[in-house]
Amino acid sequence: MEPAVKTVQKSAAQTSPTQSYISGAGMYVPDKVVPNSYFESYLDTSDEWIRERTGIRERRWTEFGTGASVLAEPAARKAIAAAGLSVADIDGIVVATVTPDCTFPSTACFLQSRLGMTRGFAFDLNAVCSGFIYALVTADALIAAGRAKHLLVVGVDIFSHLVDRNDRSTCVLFGDGAGAVVLSSTKLLPAAAGAGLNGTRAAGSSHVEARGIIATEIHSDGSQSEILCVANGSAKPLTPERIAAGDHLVKMAGREVFKQAVRALAAVSESVLNSAGVTVADLDYYVSHQANKRILLAVGKQLEIPEEKVLINVDKYGNTSAASLPILIAESAENGTLKKGDLIMLSAFGGGVTWGAILLRW
């Protein structure tokens, strides 16, 4: 699949005096656990069927009417605290979401208010399940341009409000949640790990010379928009007929999404590795959007990444869209899986279609 848009590509040769790194991460999921047995009670499905095809055994759903900013706030506060900062240190907020509190103002502005911030900037970004990748790339560019020192980057989505609960092909997949990171500036220059410039460990030492974002790519192909979408909007305003047809709910061509996701994620990951001058063998972990365990393992197999290096928590939370990557990052940081100096590949594929990858040193 050839990209219609190839927006950001940052490599060792293009580094700026100001780089960015993840200084803190946090997550939040609702208390309500929805196990696969819930769907067994009214749909022609089973726990075994769901687990075999998706790897999901449960997900979290919030109460109807909950705003995305409500989920984002605790995740944001945890990320800020983990970074050793206060809200007053944050220069701006970038929120990736397709389930905003309302049409406008942005969810980022609502979150800014909840946090008690009265300075800086706040805006939303929509790239569906690739949203966090797009948001992190955007924040990295703002820091590289000297526009901010500490940015709060959030992925939050509430898909339980968007699924047709009688459509077993989609309703079993999605969960609600929020994840956040603080992206901070540093003067250290990450570059090609193979050349020892981006924070490689010294022999026999745990010392790491540098950390941060090394290389990024984001892509989109708008000609594929119909394979994963919610069809209502200004071009298709809701009418009783469209509501009856379910145009306000998620529609997905599952097999096509699977096929395109595996191909795109493998290709963009290889491209980012090549631009940074490293190989799969240099990676400590592959952290990809938690859409489906079969997709994760298929991409890992295609890239020849050992399964133990492919981080997975889709079994507990389902597909949380833009929130899945920061939730997995925060959880892995908290439980000690991610360690300072680890070389990590982030990747995601989502509606649009959109996809991208980021190579970073933890």
Image (tube, rainbow, N blue to C red):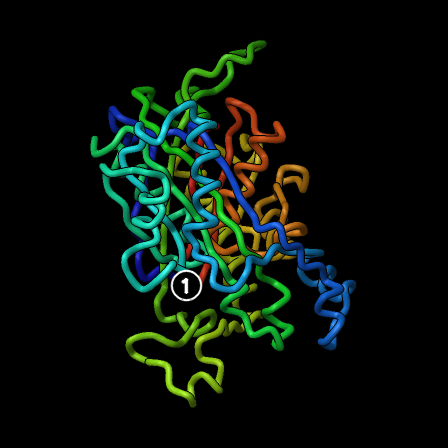
Q: Which residue: 50% across, 45% down?
A: 325
Note whether 39 is above or below 24 in the view shown. Answer: below
Q: Which residue: 47% across, 56% down?
A: 157
**Residue 46: x %, y % from top left:** 77, 68
**Residue 105: x %, y % from top left:** 27, 57
| In front of the other: 314 or 295 | 314
**Residue 166: x %, y % from top left:** 62, 77
Note whether 82 is above or below 325 in the view shown. Answer: above
Q: Looking at this view, name the residue that lies furthest to the bottom.
A: 241
Q: Which residue: 30% across, 44% down?
A: 138
| In front of the other: 183 or 4 | 183
Quadrant housing residue 182: top left
**Residue 205: x %, y % from top left:** 56, 10
Q: Looking at this view, name the residue that lies furthest to the top.
A: 204
Quarter of the image where the N terminus is located: bottom left
User: What's under tag 1, amino acid-wise?
Assistant: Val
Instruction: Name the secondary structure under disc 1.
Output: loop
Q: How many numbered discs sit on the rendered protein?
A: 1
Q: Which residue: 54% across, 64% down?
A: 160
Residue 261 placement, left or right of 39: left
Quadrant housing residue 137: top left
Give the residue number, with chain letter if any, for mark 1. Answer: 353
Note whether 59 is above or below 340 in the view shown. Answer: below
Quadrant housing residue 180: top left
| In front of the other: 33 or 266 | 33
Q: Crowdedness of circle 1 by 10 Å Cα count: few (<14), some, many (20+)?
A: many
